């Protein structure tokens, strides 16, 4: 079921991409991020370095390339037996972290870079993000949280050979969180890695 599901998902994702303003960061090198720069519509957020993100301010909305993440999840589960466990999650987080230098360059080179105040996304892969400079915040809308949780469970079931069993064995609840960081803090932290790496 997993391979057929991923094939169908890739097809749907290609259609979705055509009708959104999402931009790939560096698809040729397997970067896991897609980005859209847009006005912020939520409650005011103040980052740890004092940047205020208010309604109408520009921010970079981060979208993980979920098809790519799902392929990694399936690859880890089949080849290494990692899947949905802590080791598999950390392996995916490492791949995400390796995507940050190119993302930093993308943000710095954006035509409206000087107006962008922060980067923000919603993800289940929020364990350990503080070590990367990000902050986390619970979602204020429980309906959105539940919908995203159900979607992620469905992905696990479809992409992992023992998806349902692994899902029942997980002791940590699947809770999506908002993750965010100021643009200046992100660029300062990761752009140098892209230059020297």
Image (tube, rainbow, N blue to C red):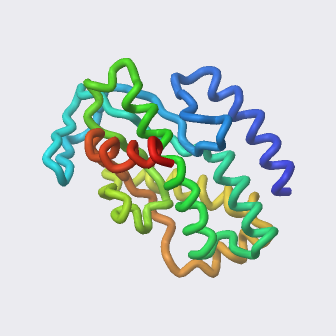
Residue 154 can be seen, yes or no:
yes
Give the quarter of the figure containing the N terminus.
bottom right
**Residue 145, percent across and down?**
44, 54
Which residue ends up furthest to the left in the rendered image? Answer: 50
The outermost residue toward the front is 196
| Above or below, 60 relative to 134 | above
Residue found at x 81% / y 68%: 78
Residue 137 visible to an observer of this rendering: no
x, y (%) of residue 109?
Answer: 40, 26
Quadrant of the rendered image containing residue 59: top left
Q: Going 60% across and 21% down the picture, which residue do you hit?
A: 19
Tally of marks: 0
Residue shown at 46% from the left, 46% from the top = 196
Q: Residue 124's spot in the image, x, y percent? A: 49, 59
Q: Nearer the viewer, residue 166 or 107?
A: 107
Q: Residue drawn at (17%, 50%), measured in percent from left and top?
A: 49
Vertically, is 11 above or below 158?
A: above
Direction top: furthest residue = 111
Residue 84 lies, with reference to residue 40, above or below; the image says below
Determine the image quadrant of residue 83: bottom right
User: In terms of depth relative to the viewer, which is nearer, 3 or 153?
Assistant: 3
User: Is residue 14 placed above or below 63 in the rendered structure?
Assistant: above
| Left or right: 121 as drawn, with respect to 152 | left
Return the x and y of residue 8 as percentages of the image width and height. 80, 40
């Amino acid at each position: 079921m997993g391979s057929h599901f991923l094939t169908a998902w890739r097809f749907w994702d290609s259609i979705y991409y055509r009708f959104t303003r999402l931009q790939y960061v560096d698809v040729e090198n397997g970067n896991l991020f897609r980005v859209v720069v847009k006005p912020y519509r939520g409650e005011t957020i103040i980052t740890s370095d004092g940047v205020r993100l208010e309604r109408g301010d520009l921010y970079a909305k981060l979208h993980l390339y979920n098809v790519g993440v799902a392929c990694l999840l399936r690859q880890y589960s089949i080849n290494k037996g990692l899947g949905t466990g802590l080791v598999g999650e950390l392996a995916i987080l490492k791949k995400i972290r390796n995507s940050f230098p190119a993302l930093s360059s993308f943000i710095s080179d954006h035509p409206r870079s000087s107006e962008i105040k922060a980067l923000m996304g919603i993800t289940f892969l929020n364990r350990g993000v503080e070590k990367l400079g990000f902050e986390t915040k619970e979602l204020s809308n429980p309906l959105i949280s539940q919908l995203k949780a159900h979607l992620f469970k469905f992905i696990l079931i479809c992409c992992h050979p023992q998806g349902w069993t692994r899902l029942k064995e997980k002791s940590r609840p699947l809770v999506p969180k908002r993750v965010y960081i100021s643009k200046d803090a992100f660029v300062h932290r990761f752009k140098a890695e892209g230059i020297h790496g």
